Image (tube, rainbow, N blue to C red):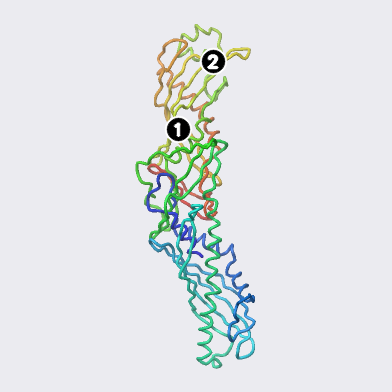
């Protein structure tokens, strides 16, 4: 059962390539935790023991023992190990007491300590594309057998009888528990491919890009996310320049989730239309009043056209898809668009356009995790270029406005972007993973979530 889970993970993780999108590397920390959880939550050994004493149609009685019952199942100790190219080998050590009427007469108690071993393979369901766990080679190994009868009353023939009987009975009794846990674990992958909303603009769905693989240290799963707009259009992830790889330096046996910059770019492209804003406020943060009088300090002609100050209306449009880049320790959001400033008029008349500037700027990204969502907050990194696209007033030197526009972007526009980004980006839902303790690292071309368990 444990192995099953492990196996599943193994299959999920495929080599060191991510197609590009996301990569999941599952170490023994997650494997042990999830397998133990599956055992505990399913109570499978206890259920198996309870079923053992029930009479079922077609079931032959155990020769020499009647009124068979199983009780006092010991808390299992689970040991897992990765088998490169195969999956996971599992050993469950447990014990129990078997009671019944013996052929020698009277009540007999048999105290059994045993190991259940199996190799677990990870498959991919052809219909759903989800991981499927399958175990094979299940064996039950008797570690010790004791009875409540004095040893001098147990000739060799009785010992042999007990040994041979238990070897016949226990595999059929205990090995089905492995498959039962497998079914239980499979359910924990069911939500992986369910489309998750990004606000009202689209969805993200995680799927496997290839068959999972296992190494001596971890299971690797390559994920190929599908980013889809609400209208149905799929946003294609750009080609990755390099394979997505987990960097060195993480604790042995730990688990990581990598999200590529290309994938985050596609997700933020869903929100591109929400990045277009029209701002009418005259007072914004520490900025000077947003009126034509302020503009006249940079463009004197404005004062001639508007001797009486008029409120400004500023419209910012992002004309190209946003782009996320990552270098070690730093991530940027690149935005390219236009800033149009207009003079407001009374009586609900449309504002009069003054000029349009083409602008290219970067926002510094700070990542965090809240629930099952990746949260993004931004601040202005720098204004890269400012070019006059058109002007209804006169030609002017737009470079003189660099400081003013930079302050405007930080004070007026960045808060709008951060409000839009509060929707969060959905993280893959697998094995009931809780991300709240994850530690985040920005590496070359990827964000790493170092998964921490409770």
Q: Which of marks 2 and 1 is nearer the N terminus?
A: 2
C-beta proximity under 8 Å, tags 2 and 1: no
Residue at the image point whose x is 59% and y is 66% from the top: 43
Q: Quadrant of residue 112?
A: bottom right
Q: Give the percent coordinates (x, y) of residue 418.
A: 53, 33
Q: In the displayed structure, would residue 184 be above or below residue 310?
A: below
Classify 85 as above or below 222: below
Is residue 405 visible in the rendered image? The answer is yes
Residue at point 49%, 25% (across, down) = 317
Between 431 and 404, the one nearer to me in the picture: 431
Q: Which residue is drawn at 38% across and 47% down?
A: 244
The residue that disc 1 covers is 322
Image position of 397 with respect to 33: above or below: above
Which percent across, then down, holds residue 240? 37, 41
The residue at which mark 2 appears reads as 291
The CA distance from mark 2 to mark 1 is 30 Å
At x 40%, y 47%, the residue is 18
Where does residue 197 sit, x and y in percent of width and height? 56, 41
Pick the front one: 189 or 302? 189
Q: x and y percent of residue 370 in the render?
A: 55, 44
Q: What element carries label 2?
A: loop
* Element under disc 1: loop
Residue 66 appears left or right of 335: right
In the rendered image, which quarter is residue 202 located in?
top right
Q: Please rate how many residues cluster around mark 1, counting C-alpha atoms within 10 Å: few if below 14, some from 14 to 19, many from 20.
A: many
Q: In this view, does 349 lie to the left or right of 211?
A: right
Q: How crowded is mark 2: few (under 14 residues within 10 Å), some or many (20 or more)?
A: many
Q: In this view, does 191 lie to the left or right of 330?
A: right
- State whether residue 130 is above or below residue 447: below
Asked which quadrant contains residue 219, the reply is: bottom left
């Amino acid at each position: 059962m444990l192995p099953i889970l492990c196996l599943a993970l193994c299959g999920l993780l495929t080599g060191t390539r991510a197609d590009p999108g996301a990569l999941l590397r599952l170490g023994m920390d997650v494997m042990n935790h999830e397998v133990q959880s599956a055992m505990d939550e399913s109570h499978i050994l206890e259920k198996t023991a309870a079923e053992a004493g029930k009479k079922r149609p077609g079931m032959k009685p155990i020769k020499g023992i009647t009124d068979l019952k199983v009780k006092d199942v010991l808390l299992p100790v689970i040991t897992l190990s990765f088998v490169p190219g195969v999956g996971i080998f599992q050993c469950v050590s447990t014990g129990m007491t078997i009671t019944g009427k013996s052929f020698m007469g009277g009540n007999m108690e048999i105290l059994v300590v045993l190991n259940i071993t199996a190799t677990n393979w990870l498959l991919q369901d052809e219909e759903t594309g989800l991981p499927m766990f399958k175990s094979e080679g299940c064996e039950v190994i008797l570690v010790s057998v004791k009875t409540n009868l004095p040893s001098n009353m147990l000739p060799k023939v009785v010992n042999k009888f007990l040994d041979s009987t238990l070897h016949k009975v226990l595999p059929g009794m205990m090995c089905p528990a492995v498959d039962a846990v497998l079914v239980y674990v499979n359910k924990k992958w069911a939500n992986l491919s369910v489309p998750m909303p990004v606000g009202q603009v689209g969805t993200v769905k995680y799927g496997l890009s290839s068959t999972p693989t296992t190494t001596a240290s971890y299971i690797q799963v390559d994920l190929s996310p599908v980013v889809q707009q609400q209208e149905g259009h799929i946003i294609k992830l750009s080609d990755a320049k390099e394979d997505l790889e987990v960097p060195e330096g993480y604790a042995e046996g730990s688990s990581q989730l990598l999200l590529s910059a290309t994938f985050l770019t596609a997700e933020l492209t869903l929100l591109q239309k929400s990045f277009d804003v029209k701002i009418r406020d005259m007072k914004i943060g520490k900025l000077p009043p947003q009126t034509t009088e302020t503009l006249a300090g940079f463009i004197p002609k404005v004062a001639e056209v508007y001797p009486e100050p008029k409120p400004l209306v500023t419209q910012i449009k992002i004309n190209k898809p946003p782009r996320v880049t990552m270098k070690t320790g730093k991530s940027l959001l690149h935005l390219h668009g236009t800033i149009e400033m207009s003079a407001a008029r009374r009586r609900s008349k449309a504002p009069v356009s003054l000029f349009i500037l083409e602008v290219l700027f970067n926002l510094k990204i700070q990542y965090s995790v809240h629930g099952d969502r990746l949260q993004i907050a931004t601040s202005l990194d720098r204004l890269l270029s400012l070019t006059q696209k058109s002007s209804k007033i006169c030609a002017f030197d737009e470079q003189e406005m660099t400081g003013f526009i930079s302050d405007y972007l930080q004070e007026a526009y960045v808060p709008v972007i951060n409000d839009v980004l509060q929707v969060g980006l959905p993280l893959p839902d697998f094995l009931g993973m809780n991300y709240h303790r994850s530690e985040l690292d920005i590496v070359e071309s990827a964000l790493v979530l170092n998964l921490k368990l409770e």
